[in-house]
Amino acid sequence: MADKKTHDVKPHDVKPMKPEEILNLIHANRGTAICVPTMTTGPHWRTIAPDDLSVGCVGFMGGASSLGLGLALAQPDRRVLVLDGDGSLLMQLGSLATVAGAAPRNLVHFLFKNGVYHTSGAQGIPGGLTVDFVAMAKGAGYRMVCAIHDIGDFKRRLPEILKSEGPIFVELHTGLADQTPMTARGGVPFPKQVSNLRAKLLKPRA
Amino acid sequence: MPESIPATLIIDTLKDTFREARTALAAEVSEPPKHSHLGWILSVPDTHQKTVLAALDKEEAIRTLTCATEDEATTIAAGLHIGGEPCVLMIQHAGLYASVNTLRGVGMDGQVPIFYMIGLLSREKDKDPSESRHSMVRYAEPLLDTFGVPHARLEGPNDVHLIPDYYRLSRARKGPAVVLVGLETI
């Protein structure tokens, strides 16, 4: 569902969505999906979804989509939602082709597009807001791609996005999050997140 | 003198390694994933192991996923591990150099067991890798030593037991472990 009409809206033509509102909606609708937040989606996510079926991409920027892909291939009966950033995705842009090639039906790749490296001081990403990730994901071979600019539209379309066959790519035009991993440090260390999620999925014998 | 290893021997060893890993997981957890395949090869194609990769194309028991970069392969391995799936990374030394931050972040600091088979492309048959005229051959073992990653060389068919040995070691240490493929496979 390449959404040419909304995709063509120029940056700042509409008020960007608040990342926290998007994350709240995803959390409310995710069901038993595994979630992979990264960078500025992390701090708010851990306040609304503590100790749940999530594992953050921490310490290897750009890896969220690959981490999500591995989970999706291992657990094909469960949805995997990647909560990626534009600067992060640029670091491993080839992952779009790898995800599309593997074609996991259970993976949804949300891209929070704000045009900057917010965590390191809001320096502009190469190309800024003009980078067309929807076109890239479509060209790579994602089964369904779209861009969403309005929170009401996102709320309306989210249920369909979460039940459609993947891989799905959703570019979300957002402003800056209230917190970054630098202003809201802490959270469960990555190794502990790994062991916690593995235990929840596989259920160690007593 | 090192010898080339037949692809069939490596693939049979990988199958045994995956079977053992699944048996171990089934004893450890009550809900292991149920798949028809034995395990995964995550590959960024390596000239040195190309006969293995060609043979894997015809293998239904092992799923092969070609990745765009070694960073991706390492991180996909983490996701597979969390979800209970056994996997082996097949890359070449240049890919190791390209992905050391992910090796550090995911494998070492992240304490994720990751087992690599790394081809020493251009390694001279009559030289120890440390004496190679190619820097990409010479630096592989010193780099792994710097990061404290255990490694061993596959120098011939008698060494294939190192594949399950180092796979187990990666699980026991909760981190990366490597076997270096000394000569091009046949």
Image (cartoon, rainbow, N blue to C red):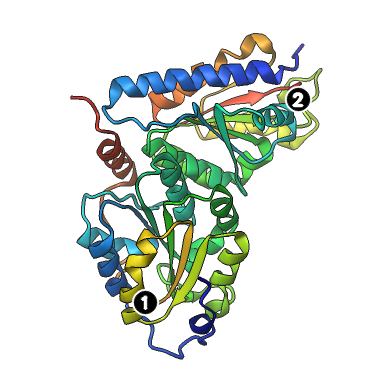
- Identify the mark at residue B31; answer none if there is no mark: none
Whether labels 1 and 2 belong to a single chain: the reply is no
Which residue corresponds to the image point at 46% horizontal and 51% vertical from the top-left? A105
A115 is higher (above) or lower (below) than A110? below
Report in which chain the residue with disc 2 lies: B
Report in which chain the residue with disc 1 lies: A
> B39 or A1, which lies in front?
A1
Image side of residue A2 versus residue B26, left or right: right
Q: How crowded is the residue under tag 2: few (<14 C-alpha within 10 Å), some, or many (20+)?
A: many
Say what amino acid the circle numbered 2 marks: Glu
Which residue corresponds to the image point at 39% horizontal and 77% vertical from the top-left? A174
Location of the C terminus of chain A by quadrant is: top left
* Mark 1–mark 2 CB contact (< 8 Å): no
Q: Quadrant of residue A159?
A: bottom left
Which residue corresponds to the image point at 34% horizontal and 46% vertical from the top-left? A190
Give the distance between the C-alpha atoms of the residues marked 1 and 2, in whole angstroms: 51 Å
Q: Which residue is mark 1?
A: A176
Q: Quadrant of residue A85?
A: bottom left
Residue B184 locus on image (x, y percent):
75, 25
B170 is higher (above) or lower (below) than A166? above
Q: How crowded is the residue under tag 1: few (<14 C-alpha within 10 Å), some, or many (20+)?
A: many
> B46 or B134, which lies in front?
B46
A42 is higher (above) or lower (below) than A104? below
Which residue corresponds to the image point at 24% horizontal and 33% vertical from the top-left? A203
Q: Which residue is mark 2?
A: B184
Q: Is residue A184 visible?
A: no
Residue B33 locus on image (x, y percent):
37, 33
